[in-house]
Image (spheres, rainbow, N blue to C red):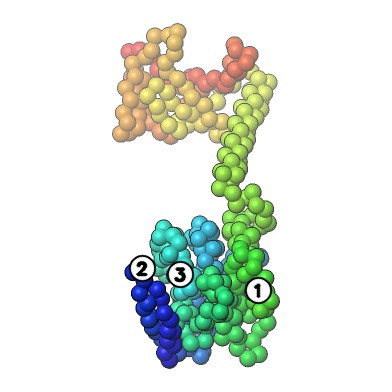
Amino acid sequence: MLKSKTFVKKTRSGGVLKVVREHYLRDDIWCGSETCAECKQDSTVLQRDACMESSLCPYPHYLVPDTNVVLHQIDVLEDPVIRNVIILQTVLQEVRHRSATVYKRLKDIAHEPGRHFYTFTNEHHRETFIEREPGESANDRNDRAIRVAVKWYSQHLKTPGSDPDGLKVVLLTNDQGNKQKAEENGLLVYADIIVHRLLAVAIGADSTYADLMDKHKQSALCNNLNYRHKMSQYAQRASVAFHTQLFFKARGILNEEGFVLFVRKNAIIVLIPKFGLEGTVFFTSKNKVSPNLVFDEEGPTLRVEQHTFHIFDRVKVTISLDDSNIQHQKIRMALIEPVVRKA
Ligand SMILES: [Zn+2]
């Protein structure tokens, strides 16, 4: 079917030009849905089971974002949790005119097979193409075209006697006017806030409030969480150290069997299985002459004078509480066996 539109236009030089615009409308544009038995499509993009991990939407649904949602919420659309989205030709054209960057990002998402983004050429579909009405702005005409396409999809995918909780087609808009007109037409609408909420749900925060979606506030929130996590780790370590010290303070000096867990350049780290305690036996200290140490990274081994330590060697150590600095009490480990002394 051919629709033609004739109008006259004044040129820059002052002449009058007759313009004939032809617009072909077709019957062979398919809906792209797996659930459809009517369209003669070879392959489909939109899934039958189009459920998001979202408690918000208990029923399967396809999302149809309007131009402003694409332009301003492209970050949200890029989130992998958002799947089964219908991109209308009207929206695609408006986005292309308004932002080359967003247009490219949208095309990139649409090319990811796992995302199930379907481009529907509603402007060439016989049942979804609309003419601009007298006095109607181009903007209003496009908004209406979007609503008409959503309505068409809803009816097209509704099978006789179908489940009322079955597949729904949902218009995503943050335009109050568009939302109101869509609701008057009985269309399902998710306002902007709901797009946010979907992402909130996606990240496991099953409720919505504006601050959560603010990049800067989100970043501040993350910093605070990281800070608190780090502090709780410090507190945990300090608590373990404190109770270990209390335990050994009451027992005086103990001789225990242990195993070498790691060897370092000037020390061995020993595990005492009886207490589940790890400690370090140093072979160098500020006040003493150091023994002869040879560290072999490859082993790894550490030779102390005539003795070579390997990982898992059995050793005996003394464990005691060093309270010479009351602010920094420490568990000290010293080697008893094997005896290392200068040759
Ligand atoms: Zn179909």
The image position of residue 82, as x and y in percent, is: 53, 65
Q: Amino acid at mark 1?
A: Lys
First along the sequence among labels 3 and 1: 3
Distance of label 1 from label 2 (alpha carbons): 39 Å
The image position of residue 12, as x and y in percent, is: 36, 68
Task: Please state which of the two labelled residues, at mark 1 or mark 2, is closer to the viewer.
Answer: 2
Above or below, 238 relative to 44? above
Distance of label 2 from label 3 (alpha carbons): 30 Å
Q: Amino acid at mark 2?
A: Arg
| Mark 2 residue crowding within 10 angstroms, few (<14) / some (14–19) / many (20+) | few
| Number of the label disc, if any, that sits on residue 12 | 2
| Mark 3 residue crowding within 10 angstroms, few (<14) / some (14–19) / many (20+) | some
First along the sequence among labels 1 and 2: 2
Q: Residue at x 58, y 55 (%)?
A: 203
**Side of 244 where 115 appears, left or right:** left
The residue closer to the viewer here, 180 or 224, is 180
The image position of residue 230, as x and y in percent, is: 58, 35
Q: Secondary structure at mark 1?
A: helix
Q: Quadrant of residue 181?
A: bottom right
**Side of 110 where 195 appears, left or right:** right
Distance of label 3 from label 1 (alpha carbons): 21 Å
| Number of the label disc, if any, that sits on residue 92 | 3
